[in-house]
Image: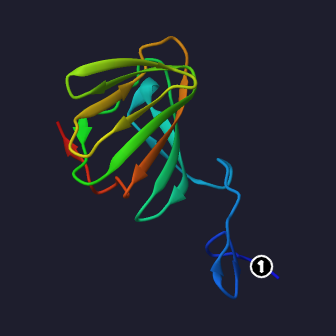
Amino acid sequence: MAKIDPEKKALRDQEGPLPLVMNREAAESYYWGDGPNRSMGWRLLEGNDLTVIEEVMPPGAAEQRHSHTFARQYFYVLEGEAVMAVADRTYALKAGDGIHVSPKQAHQIRNDSAAEVRFLVISAPRASGDRTPR
């Protein structure tokens, strides 16, 4: 019988971790940015080889342009609209759109709209600690 490991908030059995249903309420959350443009994120899956993060950016918010040496990323818009700059091109993304960013490509996501944008960032391997401002 599987049991919840209270320290890891994960189900475990004799063979190790089992799949875990994760949501924003159970995920570790964080903020980035300052003032009215402060954005929020939830770490839905955090591993060395793969991370899945849900983020919400208010109108006018933008991340710093940067690149990752090793991580490739996929940004998928759940609600709202975002602008994604990758290398020297700019893409308008709406709900249901996604874009892949290869390692070493400079990129920046921003919200130029009048409403919040909610999106997923999927990174392989982990992108934290692998970030260079551009």
Q: SS of the residue at dot 1?
A: strand
- Which residue is depicted at the point 23% across and 42% down? 67
Q: How is the image coloured?
A: rainbow
Q: Quadrant of residue 102?
A: top left
**Mark 1: few/some/many CA within 10 Å (<14, 14-19, 20+):** few
Q: Residue furthest bottom?
A: 14
Q: Is residue 36 above or below residue 55?
A: above
Q: Which residue is mark 1?
A: 3
- Position of 1 compared to 121: left or right? right
Q: Is residue 55 left or right of residue 34?
A: right
Picture coordinates of residue 119, whole percent (x, y) = 53, 33
Quadrant holding the N terminus? bottom right
Q: Is residue 107 left or right of residue 78?
A: left
Seen from the viewer's position, the closer of residues 133 and 84 is: 84
- Where residue 27 sits: x, y (%)? 61, 54
Residue at image point 34% right, 52% down: 127
Look at label 1 and name its amino acid: Lys
